Structure formats: C-alpha cells, structure tokens
Amino acid sequence: MKSLKKILILLACLAVIAGTALSSGCNKKTYAVYTNIPQGEFEIIDSTFTLGGTIGGYSPAEKEKGEEVDTSNYTARDCVYPSVMYTEAQLVVYGDFTAEGAEEHFENFRKAVGRRLTEISKAVSSTVTNSDIYNFNNAAAGATVEISQTTYEILAEAKAVYDFTDHYYNPALYYNIKAYGFSTAEKYPQTAAELPSDEVVAEYTKLASHFGEIELSNDNGYFVTKPAYTVEVGGENLTLKVDLGGIAKGYAVDEVDGLFDEYGYKFGYFNFGASSMLVKRHFKNDNFNLEFISPRSIKRDGYLKISFCNEKVSTSGDNEQRYIIDGVRYCHVIDPTTGKPVQTGIMSATVIGGSAASADALTTAIMAMGKDKAISFIEEKLTDRKVVFTAE
C-alpha cells in the first residue's frame, strides 16, 4: 500500500496528504489563482502562483459535526482497482480491524465497490460492444435505444449540467475529441498538417450542438432517443455520439459514497483516476490536507493547500492529456464554442462540494468559459461550492 503520509494523484491537480507540504517548483513564469474560498481557509504554497482575484458569492451550508468515535485502534485497509474506465482507482478505509468480522466486512465492501465500478464502466464505454453508449453511438439518427438505469441517470445529469452551464459542458463533442487525438483515437497528431481542418471541426461542432435534443424516458424501462440531425464529413453521414468520460467517473464516486454509508464506513477516501475523489473523515483529526498540483510543474509540485472532510472534489486540467505542436498546447478539454482544445487561458479547475458527477462536468465547463465568464458563473450559480481555477 502507498504511504499515507503523501499520496499524489499524478495526472490531475490534486494530492491527498496527511503530513507536510510539498516543496514549490522552480518555474520562472507566474500564474494566477482565482477562488471563492474564504481567506484563511487555503494557502498558496508555490511562489510562482499569486492570488489573481477573490470570487464572491460563496455561502456554505452549515454542516453537522461528525460523531465522536474512539479511533485509537484504527488502522488502514486499501484496495486498488487497476483498470476501470482506462484508469486506476484507489479505495482506502480506516477502521478497527481487530474486531470480529471486520476483515470480512471490508472484503465484502471492496468487492461491492469493484462490482459497481465494473457495471458503470461497461454501461458507458464507447468501445465495449453492446454497451449502452456503444449501442447509442452506433444507432441511426432518430433511433430509440434501451439503456440501463445507470446510463439513464448519467445522461440525465449530463443534460442537466449542459443546460446549467449554458452548454459549456457538452459530452457530444465526441468527434472533436477524437479528431484531436484523444479518447479512442490511436495517436496524437505530430505536426500541424495532421490536425483536423477548420471546416471539419465546424461540422463536428455543429453536430455536437444538438446534444440538448436527446430525449430520455423511463416508462416501462429506460430509453434514450437520438437526435435526427446528421452532418456529412468526407462523404459520410455522421450521427451524434457521446463521450461520458467527463462525468461518469464523478458518478462512480457518488455511487461509492453510497456504498461507504451502506457498509457503515465513516473514515477514508476513494480516489478515481486523478479527476474525482471522495474524501470522508481522517481517523486522527477528521480533516484531510489536500494539495492541488500545479498544471505546469514537471515534478508535480503543489501550488495550493486546503483541509476538509466529508466532501467530493473534482478537477480538470490541460496537463492531463495533452501535446504541443509549434508551441501551441492541445489538450483533451474541448471548447464547445470553437470545437477545438481550450485556449481560454485557464489551466485547471477544481470544484469541491455537491455531487461528484456534476462537479466532474462543471470543471470541464469552467475551463472552456475563460476567466471572466467563469468568475461570473461561479458567483451567480456555484455559491454553495468551493471553486479554484488557475490561469496563465
């Protein structure tokens, strides 16, 4: 098991630690941090980052304090799920494992988590033959496809966030993502000549703009109806396809949170693929210390430190999946207004609080909005969540 003193989520912008802060990087360029977290509740720990501005409107709901528990005999148990949705997930639980039946109870818990992760992964995979999303993506325009309750719930949440963000979160940018070498694409473009043309990107983007026309129904089963709209690219008629990678991991975190409660575990955390995390209570002092990793640090140094418990946190960054051509950075987060990888100046976005599914999608939307629009959106619509984003 990895040391609980310092556990880094290497591909995103988060790190969970129970001890000292990481040292700052040596980047010469300076970057800005924007947040609605009240002063005194966070610490910028990298001198290359400065507070660019304080975002207003945050008014947290009062939370009940967790019950006092004798944790003097607590130790940790963990489990790594090595390949779920093309990434790794880690489950950590603290408890009294000397108690009768405790080891068996944890064994049942970790298996239940594994089963649920597998169910979600199989439902939303775009590559597994006859998965819900595979069948939807390969259906004819206007067709109705039967889906599982899991996929229905994820699509319903995706549609809700799509509307909530004025379409800045759009999971129908499937062709755009693939055209730039991400998701199911075989490789990244190596030269500017290999990038998709503006004309092709415009057609893909036009198709994605019809995501809101997807219809869901749950009368005697769960069904989704595909928009009738198509576009022609390279002599082929294309129908709308979706990639739920930007929300499904968060949904899985919410499901694991429910299993924590079902099995009676109050202490521990669940980290899914460097983008979404459930943070319960630490057995020593309730709060976990989290460091957000600089999206420009080669050594994955932290730039901001914060402590909390009993929350979910999601992050998106342009450092996770990216390449650089002719000095231009291309990442897997697509701007729905251009159909191209985001060039808004926002490097990373983190949302703490609420459901992990919505937070997962919200971070994608914030990156696509750009600084000014993101600040207005956070102040007006995310008053009950803590938000941090970084900008060049």
Image (cartoon, rainbow, N blue to C red):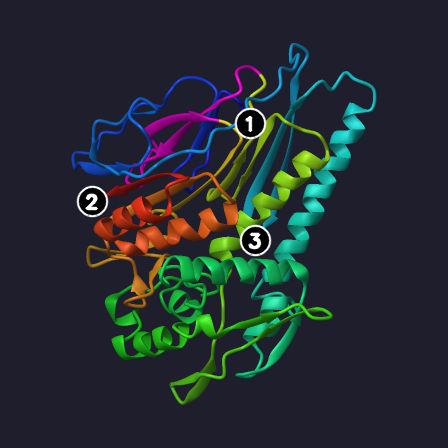
Q: Tell me the residue at 31%/28% (across/down).
A: 38
SS under mark 1: loop
Name the residue carrying label 2: 392
Q: Where is residue 40 in the image (x, y as percent from the top left)?
A: 31, 22
Q: Tell me the residue at 20%/59% (across/down).
A: 326
Q: Is residue 302 visible?
A: no
Tell me which numbered mark, 3 or 1, is placed earlier along the sequence: 1
SS under mark 3: loop
Q: Position of residue 384 (x, y in %)?
A: 41, 39
Q: Which of marks 2 and 1 is in front?
A: 2
Name the residue carrying label 1: 2
Whether 263 is drawn above or below 135: the answer is: above
Q: Position of residue 158 (x, y in %)?
A: 49, 60
How many other residues sit within 10 Å of disc 1, few (<14), some (14-19) or many (≥20)? few
For the magenta stretch, what is the residue range?
A: 284-308
Calculate the distance from the C-alpha at mark 3 to the C-alpha at mark 1.
22 Å
- The quarter of the rendered structure image containing the N terminus is top right
Q: Tell me whether the residue at label 3 lies in contact with that at label 1, contact meaning CB atoms closer than 8 angstroms.
A: no
SS under mark 2: loop
Name the residue carrying label 3: 85
Q: Tell me the residue at 61%/79% (across/down).
A: 144
**Res 81 → quadrant:** top right
Q: Tell me the residue at 49%/84% (across/down).
A: 228
Judged from this view, the residue extending furthest toward the right is 100
**In the displayed structure, does residue 135 sit left or right of residue 196?**
right
Tell me which numbered mark, 3 or 2, is placed earlier along the sequence: 3
Q: Tell me whether the residue at label 2 lies in contact with that at label 1, contact meaning CB atoms closer than 8 angstroms.
A: no
How many other residues sit within 10 Å of disc 3, few (<14), some (14-19) or many (≥20)? some
